[in-house]
């Protein structure tokens, strides 16, 4: 495609490098709540598409773009659904998110333990009379977080694999 637009080989390598950086940022964004992982990874596919080395189709871009949008929406929906399904409140969901942010500054274990602890604290702030209910709701919020994060990681990994395969063909 770059030849059609009048670019030279240097631009091909610039597109490949930018695409790679965006795909890696998308993978990181699958775990960090401050970066929207799937849209950033998809942007990497889009930029990479403009390299003359890429064989990725426009149809593939549309399908992966829809997948990125769906997974991004689900990532926001799952924690709320699973928190409410397990008897939790909005405070539990909010605590889960705050716990994740705090956990980022701790060891890698903090990313896993932080959301659960945050959801538990949020539930206890909402209603400190029932510890069992708070634990159940915290578990629901945590499972929602894990589900959303897992989906984002899988999608970012698939995007990276698609990109590498489109360059290898």
Image (cartoon, helix red, strand yellow):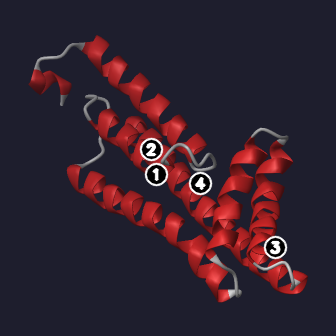
**Circle 1 crowding by C-alpha within 10 Å: few under 14, some 14–19, many from 20:** many
Q: Which residue is mark 4?
A: 153
Q: Quadrant of the N terminus?
A: top left
Identified at 48% across, 48% down, the residue is 36
* Residue 24 occupies quadrant: top right
**Tags 3 and 1 touching, CB below 8 Å:** no
Q: Is residue 128 visible?
A: yes
Q: Which residue is mark 2?
A: 41
Q: Secondary structure at mark 1?
A: helix
In space, the residues marked 3 and 2 are separated at their CA atoms by 37 Å
Name the mark nearer the viewer: 3 or 1.
3
CA–CA distance in space, label 4 to label 2: 10 Å
Instruction: Give the distance between the C-alpha atoms of the residues marked 1 and 4, in whole angstroms.
Output: 8 Å
Alpha-carbon span between mark 2 and mark 1 = 5 Å
Is label 4 in contact with label 2 (beta carbons under 8 Å)?
Answer: no
Residue appearing at x 40%, y 57% in the figure: 68
Instruction: Give the mark, 3 or 4, whose residue is nearer the N terminus.
Output: 3
Please name whichever residue, 126 or 10, is drawn nearer the observer in this view of the structure: 126
| Vertical order, 107 against 130 (above or below) | above
Q: Which residue is mark 1?
A: 38
Left/right placement of residue 11 relative to residue 26 reads: left
Q: In the rendered structure, are the residues bearing label 3 and label 2 in contact, judged by CB atoms less than 8 Å apart?
A: no
Answer yes or no: do the residues labelled 2 and 1 have beta carbons within 8 Å? yes
Task: Please report whichever mark, 3 or 2, sits nearer to the chain's N-terminal start.
Answer: 2
Q: Residues within 10 Å of mark 2 (few under 14, many from 20)?
A: many
Residue 107 percent location from the top left of the image: 85, 41
Q: Secondary structure at mark 3?
A: helix
Mark linked to residue 92: none
Q: How far across and how far down the image is residue 32, in percent?
A: 62, 45
Q: Left of 5 or right of it: where is 100?
A: right
Q: Which element is circle 2 on?
A: helix
Name the residue tied to disc 3: 124
């Amino acid at each position: 495609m770059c030849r059609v637009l009048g670019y030279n080989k240097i631009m091909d390598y610039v597109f490949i490098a930018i695409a790679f950086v965006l795909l890696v940022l998308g993978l990181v964004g699958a775990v960090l709540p401050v970066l929207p992982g799937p849209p950033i990874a998809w942007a990497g596919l889009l930029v990479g598409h403009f390299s003359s080395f890429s064989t990725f189709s426009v149809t593939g871009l549309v399908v992966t773009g829809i997948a990125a949008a769906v997974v991004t929406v689900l990532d926001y929906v799952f924690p709320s659904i699973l928190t409410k399904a397990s008897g939790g409140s909005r405070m539990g969901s909010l605590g889960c998110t705050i716990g994740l942010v705090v956990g980022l500054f701790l060891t890698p274990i903090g990313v896993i333990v932080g959301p659960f602890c945050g959801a538990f604290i949020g539930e206890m702030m909402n209603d400190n009379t029932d510890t069992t209910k708070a634990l159940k709701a915290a578990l629901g919020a945590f499972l929602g977080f894990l589900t959303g994060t897992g989906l984002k990681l899988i999608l970012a990994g698939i995007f990276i694999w698609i990109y590498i395969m489109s360059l290898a063909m």
